[in-house]
Image: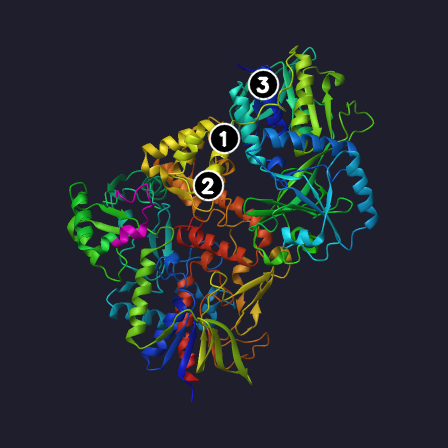
Amino acid sequence: MKACDIVVIGGGISGILAAIAAAKKGKSVTMLRYGYGAFEIGGGLIDLMAYPIDKKVSSSLKNCIDTLPIDHPYTKLGLPQVEAAVEFFLDLTNEEGYAYEGSIDELHWVPTAAGTMKPTGLYPKSFDSNILKKADTIYLVDFKGLKDYYAKLTERMLEKTLGKDKKYEIITVDPRMDEAIGGRDVMLMDIARWLDTKEGQDDCVKQLQGIVKPGAAVMFPQVFGTIPSYDVYNKIKTALQCDITEALCIPPAAAGMRLSKLLHQAARKYGVKIIEKARVKSAIVTNGICEAVVASGVGKEHIYDAKSFILASGGYYSGGLEVLDHNKVQEPIFHLPVKVMSQKEDEWANVELFSNQKQPFALAGVTVNHEMCPIDEHGKKVLKNVFVAGRNLCGYDFCFEKSGNGVALASAYQAAVSAMEV
Amino acid sequence: MEKATVIVIGGGATGVGILRDLAMRGVDVMLLEMRDMVNGSSSRYHGLLHSGGRYAVKDSEAGLECIDENRILRKIGKHCVEATEGFFVRLPEDDPAYEKEWVEACKKINLPAIQIDLAEAWRLEPNLTHRAQAVYRVPDAAIDGFRMAWQNIESAKCYGGRVKTYTEVIKVNSSNGKVTSVTVQDYFTKQQYDIECAFVVNAAGPWAGKVAGFTNIPVNVQPDRGTLIAFNHRITNRIVNRLHKSSDGDIFVPHGSITILGTTSMSVDSPEDTQVTAAEVEYLLRIGELTFEDLRGFRILRAFCGSRPLYTADAAAKGRGVSRGFVILDHAQDGLSGFASICGGKFTTYRLMAEKMADLVCGYIHNTAICRTADEELVPDINADDIAAARKYFPSFGVKLAASRLGEKRFKNVIKRMEDEPLSREIVCECENVTVAEIKEMVKTADTASNYTLSDIRRKTRMGMGTCQGAFCTFRSLGMLAQNDLMKNHDAIEEMKDFLQARYKGISPVMWGNTVREVELMRGIYEDVLNIDGGMD
């Protein structure tokens, strides 16, 4: 008798989504994690797909999924399964009181702190570039002493993106953090936490009300609280009688923290058991079946057994994939087959950091079938009860395509479905 | 028309040395650099202040020059030299007969090479291979090429020396066989204009042949590419040389928290070819791991390469061989007076090279002042009050570094700014502890009127040179420049791309281990989140 139905390895977005998906269906799930994923880097959006082949933007994931290479996780999953995953996610966020919007049918554009627009798929409604396009007057809100957001830079570049015929005005709100200025740097998270409080919200609104004219568009850095709720957004929007939006900023991202909190809330609700500081080192395998995994905890090793396992240990950033040398990549826990697209040593990385083609190193990863079950080069299953989700899959370049959390979501959902069938 | 008695072409070690030397002799001198200062060979090398040990056997004259200059630079340049000392280590694969020859050669040039016990060597350098057969201590030192150049310039400016960056000489004009002026072009605005002068010094390093070509005088400089690897660890506290006939990949030099391994030697067509290949890195690692077995376990920060300006005199050359190390060509012998080129040489002997060139120039312009560059310190010591004031704002380990990279005057300005404007204490580059106040100061004292790049700020402050290689400070620095109205004609997105590409250039040949994680973060921020390169609808 196994201790639980499913063990999930990894605490990032794909791990926790897979855990919730299975637990919601009544499975007993244990999640082993060492880190917290990239929630605070990516910014809480679920990018689905914008640049499938080159830097020419596609109108939606639905319209381009057939053009993707055969190794791409979306190609393996197929459109209906991706659609099911998107529905699962939208329902989940709705149930948890912070409903995401969007679909596989269209791209949604989000303003950034660099004055550019970034295409995404599923998003909190507080991210919206359309309001900027529509408006004649755009107010850019900055905060006194704030590091990592520079409204003058945003304004300068936004003028390039949206044109000079709009009126741009910068307003600097004082978050009353004078004691911090010059002592330690005031970060975006400080402002977001200030706006978590009623005093902060009231103060911010009061400072803006006199200046902002109703009907204009107001852009903030990513600071509408750290809690998965639209309270801050609604309050400011209503008080100012304006359309408002957040802009994506450099990490740490408050919206990523919101999504992380939302998913943890759901995971707890559905009874997912989360083991912290559990770094999975190896697996115990007999006859192509994984019996258990071995994790180093505090002071000693622990063995976790289960009927099936979901590997969501991430890619290079999280250590789920390790690069030993150019074109030599390993998955360090199960030593699953890894496919590397480039062959020659000097083809491992493009000459240009940003170019019109995907980065070969980014495409390397674990090969799986449509069930997200790892397979060898002949297509044969390597481990029958292990399924893979997220960044350690081969065949996609999340930065280039803008597909990171979308692949994480869809593969996690499928991995959970597959794991439940074992 | 702008005027200077002497124009020096080239902002590398030799050029700044000549600038300082002439300025100190009271000559009205202006240095012109086509890009930013210290952008060529002088910043693309080990940062090794040779003791002369490397040349003792093959070229005792060069060895002698090195040990003399080494002693001078330790004295005048204590703010850019780290007196680490060096080891010469013989491994089993190195010829024991060479060791004997080397010991004798060191004696001949009066270079103190002291053999030490192997156990003591391993105690001092725990990472050193236990396969070592013999170890000698020599007075090698680490020298910061950027800092040395800035300090020469600071010193020269005190004596009236002038510098123009992003000012490329495109023509040397003459009349009746005498130089009269140079025509230059601004890199950013493409505007062309003339600067009147009586003498032109060609100190363009591997570009010297191109500069001499403006006057149709052949100067045979062959760019010779050397590749190096910077590790994100202080693998060794001392410089470690292999004790064998000088070869590739046999020198390790520690600088602050990093270590540089080099180098290779390969003739190339253009000194601007500075993209390192993965094969070159692998080649260096294979040699390097003989000396430090765990070498591959250390994270590589980046790989880079530069071009040595090797001079080959052909039969027709009328060069005066000042030493085997370098050569000064007085082009009066080619029929054009008031024009001279300096070729070859090595970083360690830059001051001596500058002295010899300044002697030639002064003879021509009838200046009888004598060289004082060996006697006067490059920059004065920072006074204790300023250090104490700085401690309030800088992390303690960063105070001395900031003081020496800024120089006395700018250091004072930066502290003053931090006192007056608390917001300027904000840290832009956390890896290297570079604040808003410092970047503001550097931009305001830039040597180019028309524009500047983020890489210029990097070279002066070390912004973006640490562990994260620009992942955070690229955006922040542009933001603070915009916020403080210090942007000129910059397109912020293009500037971001250029700066990140320059960082990536050194990273792409070493994409494994933790280096890949760093790139993943960099791409995550700029490509994924900010979408700085994607097409928009």
**In this rendering, would A138 be left or right of A252?**
left
**In this rendering, would A129 be left or right of B108?**
left
Q: Based on the displayed image, in which of its 4 quarters is residue B481 positioned? A: top left
Q: Do tag 1 and tag 3 residues touch (Cβ < 8 Å)? A: no
Cα distance between the residues tagged 1 and 3: 31 Å
At label 2, the amino acid type is Gly
At label 1, the amino acid type is Phe
> Which mark is first along the chain, 3 or 2?
3
Instruction: Read off the residue under disc 3.
Output: B24
Instruction: Read off the residue under disc 2.
Output: B398
Instruction: Read off the residue under disc 1.
Output: B188
> Crowdedness of circle 2 by 10 Å Cα count: few (<14), some, many (20+)?
some
> Crowdedness of circle 1 by 10 Å Cα count: few (<14), some, many (20+)?
some
Closer to the camera in the image, B87 or B161: B87
Q: Are marks 2 and 3 on the same chain?
A: yes
Estimate the x, y position of residue B435 in percent, counting from the top left. Answer: 41, 39
Q: Nearer the viewer, mark 1 or mark 2?
A: 2
Closer to the camera in the image, A77 or B58: B58
Q: Residue at x 34, y 76 (%)?
A: A272
> Crowdedness of circle 3 by 10 Å Cα count: few (<14), some, many (20+)?
many
Say which element carries label 1. Answer: loop
At label 3, the amino acid type is Met
Cα distance between the residues tagged 1 and 2: 34 Å
Say which element carries label 2. Answer: helix
